[in-house]
Amino acid sequence: MKTKAEQKDILIEEEEEEICAQVNAETRNETPKSRHEILQELQGFGINVGALESMSIEALEELLIGVRAMVSAHANQNKRGRPKSNSGLIPIFSNSDKKILHRLMDSTGNVSSLVLSRELDIPLTTVQRRKNRLEANLIDINYSLNVEKVGWRMATLFVSTSEGKIDIVGKRILETDDMVSSVTRMIGENTIDMKVDVVFKTNKELLSLIDRVKSMEGIKNVFWSESMGLIGKSGKCYHKIIDSLGADE
């Protein structure tokens, strides 16, 4: 038999899932937002966007959808008389959500719900529901091949384009060359418009790819750097983001 706290969580999550589906439908009908517009909206929700600079625009869009849904859900709960947090801001995540996020950001791989339940002292069913929801709406999970272990190499091209050509050129690069793993739109103080991640086996292949990209219509310049090995990883930036969000438990 479920406790009152678990029953309360279930009701909240069912409402949030319904609102999330509605937000997703509304977002699909929106005019696409620029990276700057997405960051501005996230900042309006009280999120420290300084730690989000390395995220792709696709990941930022997914984050925005999840945050919108959670804000809408909590706003509806407040309308029914549910108290706001002491700061007066609409809470976005529960304390359980934040504990789970902190633990996942510290991990080097997938952490089972059973391990999370034991380590965080949260009922298993609650962990399973919340982890599934967070993975569906907030956490970016990708499989990637460790190309160095099979004799390949990785590099990043930094591309400057003619005005108004970023999306067109980016799609062309992604679709016409099988050495390209991803293309990301960039914004910053320099003239770089895109980051193109590529895999290659020899210097000749890389230089040939760079020449092909340079020859494309709409390309102004191309710089490149090669990945020489991971020095280390840290989840500190993600902890700052998680801690900047309101709690509701």
Image (cartoon, rainbow, N blue to C red):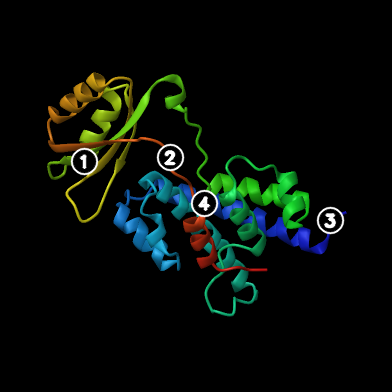
Q: CA distance from mark 4 to mark 3?
A: 28 Å
User: Who's the residue at 63% across and 45% down the image?
Assistant: 132
Q: Which residue is mark 1?
A: 166
Structural crowding at the residue carrying mark 4, measured as other residues with C-alpha within 10 Å and reported as few (<14), some (14–19) or many (≥20): few
Is the C terminus in the top left, top right, bottom left or bottom right quadrant?
A: bottom right
Which numbered disc covers residue 230?
2
Determine whether 247 is above or below 213 in the image: below
Q: Which residue is mark 3?
A: 2
Q: CA distance from mark 4 to mark 1?
A: 31 Å
Which mark is first along the chain, 3 or 1? Answer: 3
Q: Which residue is mark 4?
A: 22
Q: Amino acid at mark 2?
A: Leu
Residue 139 appears left or right of 132: left
Which mark is first along the chain, 2 or 4? Answer: 4
Closer to the camera: disc 4 or disc 1?
1
Q: CA distance from mark 4 to mark 2?
A: 40 Å
